[in-house]
Amino acid sequence: MRRLGCVFSLLLAGLSCFGSAAPQPPQKGEELQISDNAVGRYGGILVVAQRSEPKTLNPATAADAPSREVIGRLTADLIHINRQSQQTEPALARSWTVSKDGRVYTINLRRGLRFSDGQAFDADDVVFSFAVYLDEKVHSPQRDLLIVGGKPIEVRKVNQYCVRFTLSQPYAAAERIFDGLAIMPRHLLEKPYKEDRFAQLWTLNTPPAEIAGMGPFRLKEYVPGQKIVLERNPYFWKEDRSKNRLPYLDELVFLFVGNEDAQVIRFQAGDTDVISRLSAENYALLSKDASNQGIELSDLGPSLEYNFLVFNLNDLSAKHLDSIAAKQAWFGNLEFRRAVSSAIDREGIVKLVYAGRGTALWGNVSPSNKFWVDTALPHPARSVEHARELLQSGGFSWRGDGQLVDRQAQPVEFSIITSSSNAQRTKMATLIQDDLGKLGMNVHIVPLEFRALLDRVFQSYDYEASIMGLGGGDADPNAEMNVWLSSGGTHVWHLGETRPATDWEGQIDQLMQKQMVEIKYRERKRLFDRVQEIVATEAPFVFLATPNILVGAKKTLANFQPAILEPTTLWNVEQLYYSPPGAQH
Amino acid sequence: MTSRHKAMVAASLLLALHLAILFAGFMAPSDPTSQNRDFPLVPPTSLHFVDGRGKFHIRPFVYETEPVPEGLHEYRENHAHEYPLHFFVSGFPYKVAGLITWHRHLFGVQAPAQIFLAGSDSYGRDQFSRILYGGQISLAAGMLAAGISLLLALLVGCASGFYAGWIDESAMRLAELFLVLPWLYLLLAIRAFLPLHLSPSGTFFLLVAVIGTIGWARPARLIRGVVLSAKSRKYVTASRCFGASDTYILRRHVLPHTYGILLTQAALLVPQYVIAEVTLSFLGLGLGEPMPSWGNLLANLQQYNVLVSYWWMFAPALALVLVSLGYLAVADAFHQQLQSGSM
């Protein structure tokens, strides 16, 4: 009995020290990665607020941002893009080699690692995970990434700790593909996968014991409508320089709060420790009493996202949308699109929509994407006179009351749809409405529920113009293939082209395909610069602006190094720790 | 203050508000849709009487507003020069009662000074002007919708009370159905089916028609009651004996009894419908930008940072409260008159 009491008190001591599972001491033969961060201390709970609940915890089917944010903390990939340096680095892969022709990647895995449930990790898990991603029946959003040159990447196990990936053609920066492709545990998932039950696996209601990953945290609890609690993965494969196994934090909690304002209020009240994707107004609001509140805010500069105005140039012949089809004569007119671009006050957008914390854009690459932005792209100043000249040469004229009319004397009138939940884009639309009013165009703004907007833009094509945003994922041009290829799924202005509708779209197709298989950075840059030039000249999108990435965190949170790539604040969550009150870092 | 006095005060306040809103073009110093992108979210301009040298001016004056460099929506007054308030100044053109174009305005100041009596919104538009113009939309929506409701109510109520029988039964069941209808969801559903490029005036009339059509049930039941009691009066039976037709009896003996109810109901329904318009616009179902309405103006307050940082954005709520209270006080007075039998 006394012995039992002893064990019990020991257990209690362990609990009070760590709250959750204690980090396991290093095992013999375990190839841990040594993390180059300032050495921290164990303990503490990090609370963040999400706008909405994740829909699933299944890495192969999750498509929404909240799910991926949580899953990203539960799982790990082979090769990872360091969010700070924007370069790739080994993760579960200890090292990798590329064949001379750029088609074969041989990846050596770290040995002796374990999943968060304590089971061993090896090449079988890798082969299994890629088989799942490539399985058409799973409908994984990652599948497209793994199809190179029209053929799926071939994955073969060489030995227990070595996997070989063969591409059908060379692919530039192919190692970036591996980022975000979570390695899943074969021992838990193979049986249900073979029974065709994969889509129903790892929902939010799955018991935590049935979910395991290689990420810094593992699932502890899910409270519907309120929160999801993750606890330390005691087997995580990184350690700091003092041989402390990461992560330092005991728990990571995601609260579901609904919208940005609620996120701000919870952060202001001290309920949450980190906030990202702040609007400039809320940033200003928080910075008013930042020092008293013990919070630190940072402006990381322009994001990679680009907001744009797009006109509907889809083929509407089978859609019975005659009134829109009639207006496509204007939208398809290059002078018309350039006139719109010339009349828009981008500086006004930066000033009023982003309260100065944003950057005007004339192309699809944000200035913060230093490796790829074409700095030679012209930035013509706003000019209503120039816009009028363009319209005149495009065959438009003005009535006595100032209304712009086309050759058939039809008044130029169209609507812009925006997402009603995105106040910033609605605000852009209001400014553009006023700017285009100066050209005699009659513009209506229709805020729509986000899903209704996506349905109109991607399915029914029942819209005239829309303000949207893209980008923000990876900095590499390959992430943009589906936008610029004429057959791409996000080729927003004209979807479902079987072959390029215009010469310049054909040129872009060729350039994008070429840069994809080109290995040399300099040549790729030259090709992608040309794409940026064509896009800027032909104006299928009227680029508007990009917001700065604004984040905040409690001052006591150490090793906090926000980055412009998603996830901006939690990408190095395993390194975060709370410094003792009064300590400097 | 007696209730009569109260009613008089309320009525004159209402009259003043309505006149100001009717002649919004004359009262407003700036065009409600013109954006002034260098001056977003300016606090209300203060009117001064005493200048920096301590000298008193009979004519109030303002100072030029200038942005604080590096500040976000922060402004200061430039005390270098005073700009006196001028009356009957020339400004942006507008239409009086929708007919005559005019360009005189009640007050204004000389450029570069500006006057924002109720501050400016996030596009630098003068909020005072927007409240006045927005009132035109909101009040017109309220009145028109109340008119539609009462007209429907009168028709149904009279038919139901006068003819009784199956007409009464079916009309009253229909009324009950309308009473339990979750109208907000109904409107959301209707809005989802509308075409995208509905012009602002089209949206406006549709809005009015829908909210007016939904609200007829309650007044119809009241009118039915009045008609029921009126038609059983002895003089009605007498005139019927003399061979009076239904229309004659309705017109001569029954309808006059409903006037009191109609007036009271009108005074109650107008503010109710103004608020309905505000609710719809607040939810983004009303008039689109750049047209102002009180609901649109209040929708700015949905953003937390506006709510806590820019108090003058509440100004449209003040107008809404004043109008609602005015109408309710008048309705109360009508009701008391009705009770005392003098109506």
Image (cartoon, coloured by chain):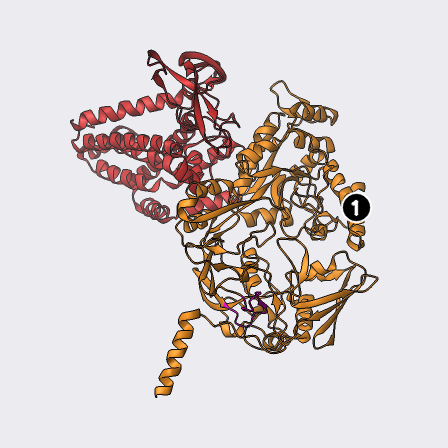
Chain colours: A orange, B red
Tell me how many marks there are. Answer: 1
Q: Is residue A121 visible?
A: yes
Which quadrant would residue A28 be assigned to in this image? bottom right
Residue A38 placement (x, y as % from top left): 55, 59
Magenta-drawn segment: A232-246
- Residue projecting furthest to the bottom: A1
- Judge from the rendering whether residue B327 lies leftward or rightward of residue A90; answer left or right: left
- Residue B92: give x, y in percent of width and height: 50, 17
Q: Residue at x 79, y 46 (%)?
A: A527
Q: Residues within 10 Å of mark 1 (few under 14, many from 20)?
A: many
Query: Residue B243, can we see it?
Result: no
The question of residue A224 being in magenta is answered with: no
Q: Determine the chain carrying the residue at label 1.
A: A
Q: Quadrant of the N terminus of chain B?
A: top left
Write down the residue under mark 1.
A527
Q: Which residue type carries mark 1?
A: Leu
* Left or right of B339 in this view: A148: right
